Each structure stands twice: as structure tokens, then as C-alpha cells.
Amino acid sequence: MLRIDKATAPLVEVFCSIQGEGIHVGRRQIFVRTFGCNLSCDYCDTLAALRTPHSALRIGEWSVFSPEGEISSHPNPATVDEVIAAVRELERISGPHHSASITGGEPLLHPRFVADLARGLGEIGLPVHLETNATLPEALAEVLPHVDVVAADVKLKSAAGENVPLSLHREFLSLITQAGKEVFVKMIVTEGTDLNEVEAAAEMVAEVNAGIPLVIQPATAVPGKPHLTPTGASLAEMQRVCLRHLRDVRVIPQCHKILGVR
């Protein structure tokens, strides 16, 4: 698997907004979006961050956005000090913020950068949320001591089109629980998602810890894929089968899309 292991990383943007996904939905956060991903999911809604790591190193700039619009741009790759300075500025003009979210793309393609950034964010008083596709356990081990919350995706082949073994997700989740970190699982589903696959994923999470919250997130329809979103009845059935194995299963859409924010 391609990985970049250096203390700089290519970024797309740093911005503040309302968290629209998962169990911390509604929180005011600063987001740091890294560039590059090791997967290419069918429902991905951040295509600007999807190119491979090697091409990512050649993108020109990353931008800093407040709710009012762009306030600065900087050459890639970014250093930790540059990102911390941008976060401080956003906190000054748009704060206070509950926490910072490191997202992508896939942030764990850049483990040293993410570890150093998370440590720096903690030093300025911002708890750190890591959003990840939960496929790079070795990189997670480097980053985990410095983050507070992990939002771990579980990829279903019938929804994402990616064949990620559940055993890989299990290894990833086990590392988080052993470290005593807060974690929740996000499972994106579409109208074509296989119910048996949904239940198998819930069983896998329960093997790690039946108390881990699971968020079933309906994919948002995108241009060219108008029928991506499952029906309410389908979502209710997915929730029902997952509750056979897990104590906390919630259905939460992408609320930032509904609110019309970044």
C-alpha cells in the first residue's frame, strides 16, 4: 500500500464548520483535510481529496476558509507549524470550537504528520478527532497516542465497491479499544447494500466490543447517481439487524449536506 511517511503532508483545505456526521454531529469544529486516499469508494463525496499519494504531492496549494470564505492559501506540502498557525487564526476569528477533526482523503497515509499535528492541536487546547477508513492499522499505532476520538469507517463491498476484509477493520478497532480511546463506527449504506453484509459487519464490531456505537449513514445522492440513498424502510431494517449484536445503533444522515455548509 502506498504511504507517505514524513512530517509534511499535502492538504486540500483547513476550515471551520459544523460537524455533519457521526455521534458528534452538530459540534463546531475546525477541519484539516489531507490529500490522497488508498481507496476509491463509489459513494465518495470528497473527490478533490482522492488522488493517489504520489500525485497528491504535486498539487499546488491548500486553502484556509472561515464561514465567510477563503482567507489565505499556502503551497503544498504543508508543515505542522503552518497548519497550527492557520488553526489559531480560525480559532481567533471564528471560535470557540469544540475540537479539531483531521479528515481526508485518508489522513493515515501521512502518519508522522498527523501524529505531530494532533500533538500540536492538543497543546493549544483542541481535542482531536480522527476520521479514517480504518484500513491502516500500522499507521494508526503511530497516531493513536495523540488523538482523542476515532471515527472509523467500515467499508461494505456492496456499497463502497471496495473489497476490504472485515478482519482488517477488526484489527484496527481492537487497537483503538486497547488504547482506551473513544471510538465509533460509521457504516455508509446505499440502496444496493446487502443486508447480510450489514449484519456481518455489526457482528465484527461486537466481537471487539458490543458497546461501540455504530452509525448507519445513508449515502447522499450525487450527480449521476440519483438513486444512491436507501429508503427509510431499508434503513430501519438495517438498524434492526445490527441491534441484534450492538447496544447503540443510530441512523444519522449527512447533516452538513442538509444544512448547506462545508
Image (cartoon, rainbow, N blue to C red):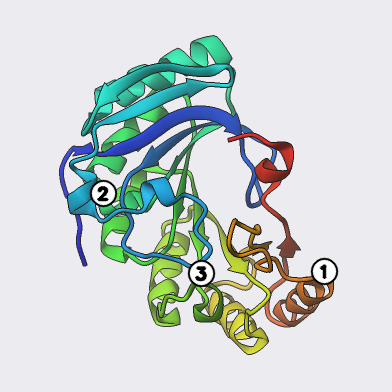
> Residue 207: x percent and y percent?
54, 80
Q: At label 2, which amino acid type do we have? A: Pro
Q: Which residue is under mark 3?
A: 154
- Quarter containing the N terminus: bottom left
Seen at 36% across and 37% down, the residue is 12
237 versus 66 height, above or below: below
Q: Position of residue 4 (x, y in %)?
A: 18, 51
Q: In this figure, which residue is indicated by the disc labeled 2?
A: 111
Residue that extends furthest to the top in the rendered view of this protein = 93
Q: Which image quarter: residue 25?
A: top right
Front label number (1 vs 3): 1
Instruction: Mark 1 vs mark 2: give the one in front.
Output: 1
The CA distance from mark 1 to mark 3 is 21 Å
236 with respect to 27 (left or right): right
Report helix, strand or loop for mark 2. Answer: helix
Tag 2 or tag 1, which sits nearer the N-term? 2
User: Which quarter of the figure has residue 119?
Assistant: top left
Crowd around label 3: few <14 · some 14–19 · many ≥20 (10 Å): many
Question: Which mark is first along the chain, 3 or 1?
Answer: 3
Horizontal placement of 25 versus 76: left or right?
right
Q: Which residue is mark 1?
A: 232
State the residue in front, 76 or 94: 76
In the rendered structure, which amino acid carries the disc numbered 3?
Val
Amino acid carrying label 1: it is Gly
How many numbered tags mark residues here? 3
Q: Secondary structure at mark 1?
A: helix
Residue 110 is left or right of residue 219, and the answer is left
Q: Nearer the viewer, residue 28 or 128?
A: 28
Q: Residues within 10 Å of mark 1 (few under 14, many from 20)?
A: few
Can you say whether 235 is above or below 123 in the image?
Answer: below
